[in-house]
Amino acid sequence: MLVFHLAAHSSMPAYLQIQEQVRQALLTGVLRPGDQLPTVKEVVGSLAINPNTVLKAYRELERDGLVEGRQGVGTFALRRPDGPPPGEQAALRRGLARWVTKARGAGLEDGDMESLLRATLRAQSQEEVA
Amino acid sequence: MNTVNTQALGKRFKAKWALTDCSFELPEGKICGLVGSNGAGKTTLLRLIAGLAQPSSGTVQVFGQPPADTTEFLQDVGFLAQDVPLYKRWNSEDHLGLGAHLNPRWGDSLTRDRLRSLGIPLDQRVGTLSGGQRAQVALAMALGKRPRLLLLDEPVAALDPLARRDFLGVLAEAVAEGDLTVILSSHLVGDLERICDHLVLLDTGRLVLAADLDDVLASHRLLTGPRRNTFALERDHTVLQIERTQRQVSAWVRLDGPLHDPHWEVAELGLEDIALAYMSRNRTRPEQLAATEAIGAVR
């Protein structure tokens, strides 16, 4: 069963964090088509969050065609989001893990790495526009 | 439909007004955080809604009716007071018996399951349970009567973080089951940010904000920029708090429209920052403002 985690001091709203975690679980194969997602009651009970937060996350996922709500039964995974297959996804993740180890060795803190990643993404997308 | 509706509601104790001119609406199914520092009027407002106190001015309606001493109203509204009202020498089983006796809609198996899943022994005297467990018994009692509106006065103030999480988790589950609106007061905003979707903010007996939480978070921003005239900003938006140093201006702002000036650096604000900005608004005297300016100039 999928378990959600919420970052305490994140600028990302809770519903987006849940949405993102479902998307990741689908991408990595933790969640397969046909699997049931945790019920709203289970999620709010364990995270102590507002039921509407979970409903909103599930609604957005449903709109993207990734999950399907079945009246009175629950919410079920429908398909993987578009993205690299699990093997490639895992390889990219391992590559990133190596990079993180290297960066940590060079004395970068987590926050530094995040800013560096954001700056790089920004620079690349500007290059593409240009 | 609105669960709660107040119009110019006020309560006076002798010469002192504990609450004045309070008008707001709370839609059905919301979890509403009632926030304010000590003495802001939170308990007074909750007692007025519960029908435990009578308004000195204005009106309060719950499910479209003024609170009354009728069976229907008492069934629909649950109130959990600050001091966790339980009989210390009784065990949970005794409390459940009393609940079943007093409440026609009592959900006995529901309440037992809830306490059992939390690992609370039903045969142990309530006085010997931990603070967190006692709070859970009180919450289970309040939910056991299956109210449509539940009022909680500082329910988690005395609990450690884990017990707090468990308590709010049970509350959120009950709301997820449907047909329940909750108002819970706290002077700690951090507890409320995750669980609430509506906010009522009181400051020294006055209502300063009552709105959907997403709207509140979307409309409040911290603007920083090089020192300049803030006339246009104050004309177009509601400036809650402003700090000036020799070089920089920081403004806590409720945006009342699009922000045209591109020179501001815009940052999102958490609920706690927003609440603090409103609360300190009325405390900052003109001479303090002048003093801040002077300190800024020295730097």
Image (spheres, coloured by chain):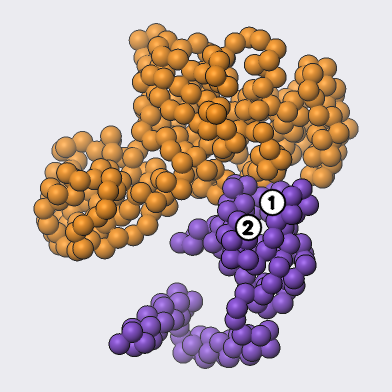
Chain colours: A purple, B orange
Q: Nearer the viewer, residue B194 or A40?
A: A40
Q: Is residue B265 left or right of residue A115?
A: left
Q: Does B299 appear above or below B287? A: below
At 55% from the left and 19% from the top, the residue drawn is B64
Q: Is residue B68 visible?
A: yes
Q: How many marks?
A: 2
- Mark 1 — residue? A40
Q: Give residue A20's quadrant in the image.
A: bottom right
Q: Amino acid at mark 2?
A: Tyr
3D distance between C-alphas at marks 1 and 2: 9 Å
Are discs 1 and 2 less than 8 Å apart at CB? yes
- The front one of B197 and B83 is B197
Residue displayed at 55% across by 15% down = B65
Whether residue B220 sits left or right of residue B51 in the image: it is: left
Identified by mark 1, the residue type is: Val
Mark 2 packing: few (<14 Cα in 10 Å), some, or many (20+)?
A: many
Chain ID of residue with mark 1? A
* SS under mark 2: helix
Single out the mark in the foreground, 1 or 2.
2
Residue B49: percent from left, percent from top: 54, 20
Give me the residue at 68% from left, 84% from top: A86
Query: For residue B200, what is the image quadrant?
Result: top left
Quarter of the image containing the C terminus of chain B?
A: bottom left
Chain under numbered label 2: A
Where residue B204 is drawn, which disc sits there? none
Residue at (60, 81) in percent of width and height:
A83
Q: Secondary structure at mark 1?
A: helix
Residue B127 in view in this figure:
no
Q: Residue B59: where, in percent of width, then height?
A: 45, 15
Mark 1 vs 2, N-terminal side: 1
